[in-house]
Image: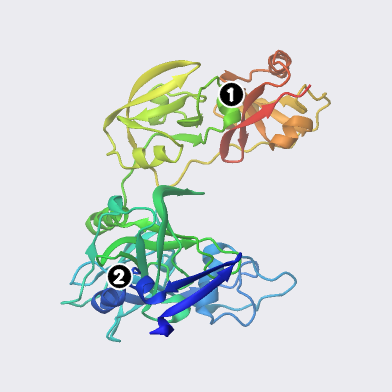
Amino acid sequence: MLRNWITVIGFGLIAAINTSAYAKDLPDFTELAEKHGAEVVNISVTQNVHADPSAMPFPGMEGDEQMQEFFKRFGIPGMPGQSAPQQDYKSQSLGSGFIISSDGYILTNAHVVSEADEVIVKLFDKREFKAKIIGTDKRTDVALVKIEATGLPKVMVGDPAKLKVGEWVAAIGSPFGLENTMTAGIVSAKGRALPQENFVPFIQTDVAINPGNSGGPLFNLAGEVVGINSQIYSRSGGSMGLSFSIPIDVAIDISNQLKASGKITRGWLGIAIQEITKELAESFGMKNTNGALVASVEKNGPADKGGLEAGDVITKFDGKAIITSADLPRAVGATKPGKIAAVEVLRKGAVKTLNMGIGEMPSETAEAAQTSKPAPKAEANKIGLTLKELTPQQKKKLNGKNGLLVVDSAGAAAQAGIRRGDVVLGLNNSESQSVDLFNKQINAIAIGKTVAVLVLRGENTLYVPIKVTK
């Protein structure tokens, strides 16, 4: 009896805790493991790699599939000063997946199988099958593969919308090749937006997820799959309690499209957007940071034809409120191409509603304009920018748009992140037509105020908030 009690001593207090009673409040995952473990598969991938010294794995790690998967997924470069062998080799990696239909359809991550020359699926009962890749979608990191088998145990699909922060969840997969490993934790956050992942409202958990877990299921306590384990944040290569899963409803929608046509169709506006910071909100005279700021509009794209302009703030799309910039790509992407959608924008302090036809997202983005290196003789303006007007050839690459080449950046502009080679396209809602006009506009800004400078850098345009300090 006494062994079920522990004594806690601290700060002059003595407390007895009944560990047996405490244990009764914890969830029991044994039934989940027994009933649903057979629905999870191990995925082994082989890729024939052409030797590239800049991209070769660490010497001696060519066959270490767990480390290879980690380095590939999280972008860790090779050790400096070590040369790679100059020969082709076979790269192997491991992942996880789960069965969604009894006739052999399996969901996993796109990053697990997209580069594969051969995919082998190993079932719970140790049977192995060569799998066919039905399709992959790198934008959501979802892939659908098929094995020739029947009568397979399939997962039950849950509703991620019903998940609550703090709710217990569990993962089953093959971390570091250890098959059918279960780990558990809680939902830490929902609807999490991650850099470069515009179409997925991730479920964040503290479940231990490691290399090899990729593509495996995230279960709720009812034994329903609510997500696909996709990413982790880690500085060590192992779990640090920050794991991210793709909601299963997103994945099922992708798998249905892949099964039907082998490709994904998404709505598209042809714009670049960015988050609205407090500084940008101040520069545009906004009362809050809600909405998505339009940084650029592709010429002749759906948004351009619909009247959308750089500097507009989209606050509502097709009846859905846009609270953060991450809300917009998901809403647009889920809209059927060809539909006419009402887009509510804030433009120079006034609310406008634009009706525009939704296009189909292209598979590749258009090539952006590149600027040449200048050698001007000019003086820095009030915020530290030394500018030069573009040549006719440079303007041609910008589809005839006006812009000012950044010759040098210092002071407030440099601190804000503007650098040499950038192209300044506008100030707040005004286009930059000449160096003199731009500098006059800057000189008219009172000290202590924040301005939003629209900048083109490589393929990307963004507004940079700069506080005028002199």
Q: Is residue 195 above or below residue 72?
A: above
Where residue 28 sits, quadrant-wise, is bottom left
183 or 9, nearer to the observer: 9
Outermost residue on the bottom side: it is: 126
Q: Which mark is residue 371?
A: none
From this viewpoint, is residue 451 visible?
A: yes
Disc 2, SS? strand
Whichever of labels 1 and 2 marks the residue nearer the N terminus, that label is: 2
Which residue position is annotated with label 1? 282
Local crowd size for mark 2, using a 10 Å CA cut-off: few (<14), some (14–19), many (≥20) = many
Local crowd size for mark 1, using a 10 Å CA cut-off: few (<14), some (14–19), many (≥20) = some
Q: If the image is split into quadrants, where does the C terminus sit?
A: top right
Q: Could you tell me the amino acid type at mark 1?
A: Glu
Identity of the residue drawn at 43% across and 28% down: 314
Identity of the residue drawn at 68% across and 15% down: 441
Where residue 416 sits, quadrant-wise, is top right
Outermost residue on the left side: it is: 151
Q: Position of residue 295 (x, y in %)?
A: 53, 31
Q: Is residue 164 above or below residue 410?
A: below
Q: Position of residue 232 (x, y in %)?
A: 49, 62
Q: Could you tell me the amino acid type at mark 2?
A: Phe
Which residue position is annotated with label 2? 98
From this viewpoint, is residue 400 visible?
A: no
